[in-house]
Amino acid sequence: MAKTRAHEPQPMPHTKAHHLLNPLRSLILTPEKLVARLDLSPDFRVLELGPGPGYFSPTVARSVPEGKLVLVDVQQEMIGSAEDAGFRYCATHGNFLSYTVNFRKER
Ligand SMILES: C[S@@+](CC[C@H](N)C(=O)[O-])C[C@H]1O[C@@H](n2cnc3c(N)ncnc32)[C@H](O)[C@@H]1O
């Protein structure tokens, strides 16, 4: 049977990104619990693939104060949402965003 477009894998639409910031997610896994599992050193350079609007990203970035967090998402709009999470970014190129670990605000 020929594959139709409807059967091709699609990323979660960026228009639904706000669902990924629902606080009820903490019932399953908080960003702090994720970071505890990662055992990061302060100078680590971390690549987060598919960060969406950045539910985990600020907490991960705070865990590498002498390092760097790089976000790469296939949807440029998701990177735009992650920017709104309060990062002061140092570089944006389409769907690639490289952050320093300074924040304009806490989430
Ligand atoms: C379900 S969302 C999860 C977002 C985030 N990790 C979270 O837990 O809140 C999946 C994200 O991965 C991105 N994504 C899907 N395929 C990708 C790929 N091949 N490369 C980079 N990002 C991808 C989507 O655009 C979307 O933002």
Image (cartoon, rainbow, N blue to C red):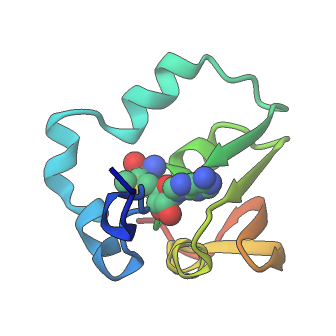
Q: Is residue 29 above or below residue 7?
A: above
Which residue is rendered at x = 75% and y = 68% of the image?
A: 97
Q: Is residue 97 left or right of residue 90?
A: left
Q: Is residue 13 above or below residue 34?
A: below
Q: Nearer the viewer, residue 16 or 29?
A: 16
Residue 51 seen: no
Q: Is residue 56 left or right of residue 1?
A: right
Q: Where is residue 10? Give x, y as percent.
A: 42, 62
Q: Is residue 46 above or below residue 58?
A: above
Q: Where is residue 79? Give x, y as percent.
A: 60, 73
Residue 15 image-quadrant placement: bottom left
Q: Is residue 89 left or right of residue 53?
A: right
Residue 73 seen: yes
Q: Where is residue 54? Give x, y as percent.
A: 49, 61
Q: Classify the position of the C terminus by image quarter.
A: bottom left
Q: Nearer the viewer, residue 70 or 85?
A: 70
Query: Residue reaching furthest front?
Result: 1
Q: Is residue 12 left or right of residue 101?
A: left
Residue 31 image-quadrant placement: top left
